[in-house]
């Protein structure tokens, strides 16, 4: 897969099968669009996932908006699934472009689109004036095939990034996994901590979650941890360590079962499979240890 961070750097001359959107989370609905693009790719037609990076817009509006997926995670998920990933910053130039101009200059002029797949609610161009009806209107003019893909449903509700964010914020990780098609995860570099867990006989790997990533409620989670390409069962505490720390920094501490190697400086991925209990402050370190042991036994017995 080739990664392109700005439109001007895309120079492919072959025609393209393209899907467009924000692709926050790459959930089951997004995966359906990508599968349609892959089905229309060939030696003469490359597959393109065109993702709008909304960070510039949020910065202009002074908003801090959390995402289900970082740019790095999107790259890792899509690697091997498409010929090109275009991460297009949603700049004033892009947001102010008229919809007809976007079709002519970007979809046709830049991508030589032979096939376009979008969802039923896709909008584009200045003030979102472009929609599936406009794309249909210009299909015959420019000779591309348009497929409008119906939404994926879960228990009668349309799957969307907004829906998934609701579930993550509520700690309903099993539902989030159903909607995404994979487990919600947080990644980071293993840091040195106070090593209290090691002293208690329950060593942990500590990571600082990426700031742009949406965090579920503070608390204890059953986890699956990826270390160097291998997966291990474990338990994680996401929170501010109220029993032993007062700096308020968000940390994910993970005790990995049946694992005793040093991982400082390594990047690990922690899948948050299910919420066990809220984070709480204990009266003593001994009480904390007793609860940690009980949590571990509860997870191992599942």
Image: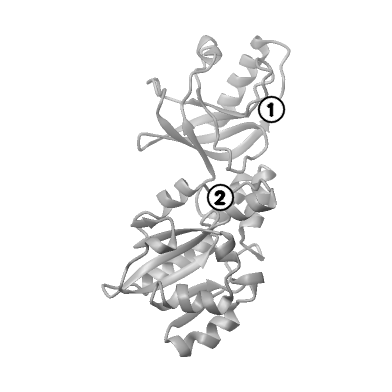
Crowding near the residue tagged with mark 2, few <14, some 14–19, many ≥20 C-alpha atoms within 10 Å: many
Quick check: can you spot residue 36? Answer: no
x then y, percent, for residue 229: 35, 38
Looking at the image, the residue that sits furthest to the left is 43
x then y, percent, for residue 62: 69, 48
Above or below, 83 relative to 244: below
| Quarter of the image with the N terminus in it | bottom left
Mark 1 residue element = loop
Q: How is the image coloured?
A: one colour
**In which quadrant of the rendered view does residue 210 lie?**
top right
Say the numbered circle drawn on residue 177.
2
Is 81 on the left or on the right of 219, as rendered?
left
Question: Is 144 or 56 nearer to us in this picture?
Answer: 56
x then y, percent, for residue 23: 53, 59
x then y, percent, for residue 141: 47, 89
Is 80 on the left or on the right of 198, as rendered?
left
Crowding near the residue tagged with mark 1, few <14, some 14–19, many ≥20 C-alpha atoms within 10 Å: some
Question: Is 64 or 48 nearer to us in this picture?
Answer: 64
Looking at the image, the residue that sits furthest to the bottom is 140
Circle 1 is placed at which residue position?
Answer: 279
Question: Is 299 or 42 nearer to us in this picture?
Answer: 42
Above or below, 48 relative to 233: below
Above or below, 265 relative to 10: above
Question: Is 31 or 273 nearer to us in this picture?
Answer: 31
Q: Going 68% across and 44% down the picture, which residue do you hit? A: 169
Label total for image: 2
Quick check: can you spot residue 141? Answer: yes
Say the numbered circle drawn on residue 109.
none
Q: CA distance from mark 1 to mark 2?
A: 22 Å
């Amino acid at each position: 897969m080739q990664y392109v961070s700005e439109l001007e750097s895309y120079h492919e001359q072959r025609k393209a099968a393209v899907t467009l959107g924000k692709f926050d989370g790459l959930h089951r609905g997004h995966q359906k669009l990508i599968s349609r693009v892959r089905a229309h790719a060939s030696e003469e037609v490359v597959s393109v996932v065109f993702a709008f990076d909304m960070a510039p817009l949020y910065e202009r509006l002074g908003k801090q908006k959390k995402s289900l997926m970082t740019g790095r995670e999107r790259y890792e998920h899509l690697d091997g699934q498409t010929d090109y990933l275009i991460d297009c910053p949603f700049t004033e130039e892009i947001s102010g472009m008229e919809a007809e101009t976007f079709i002519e200059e970007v979809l046709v002029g830049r991508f030589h689109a032979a096939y376009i797949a979008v969802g039923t609610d896709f909008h584009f161009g200045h003030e979102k004036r472009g929609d599936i009806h406009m794309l249909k209107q210009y299909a015959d003019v420019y000779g591309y095939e348009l497929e409008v893909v119906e939404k994926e449903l879960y228990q009668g509700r349309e799957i969307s990034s907004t829906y998934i964010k609701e579930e993550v914020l509520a700690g309903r990780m099993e539902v989030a996994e159903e909607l995404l098609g994979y487990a919600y995860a947080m990644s980071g570099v293993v840091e040195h901590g106070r090593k209290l867990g090691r002293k208690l006989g329950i060593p942990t790997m500590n990571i600082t979650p990426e700031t742009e990533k949406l965090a579920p409620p503070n608390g204890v989670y059953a986890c699956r941890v990826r270390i160097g390409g291998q997966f291990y069962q474990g338990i994680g505490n996401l929170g501010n360590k109220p029993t032993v720390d007062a700096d308020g920094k968000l940390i994910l501490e993970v005790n990995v079962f049946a694992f005793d190697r040093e991982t400082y400086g390594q990047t690990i991925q922690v899948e948050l499979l299910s919420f066990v209990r809220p984070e709480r402050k204990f009266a003593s370190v001994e009480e904390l240890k007793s609860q940690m042991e009980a949590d571990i036994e509860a997870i191992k017995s599942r």
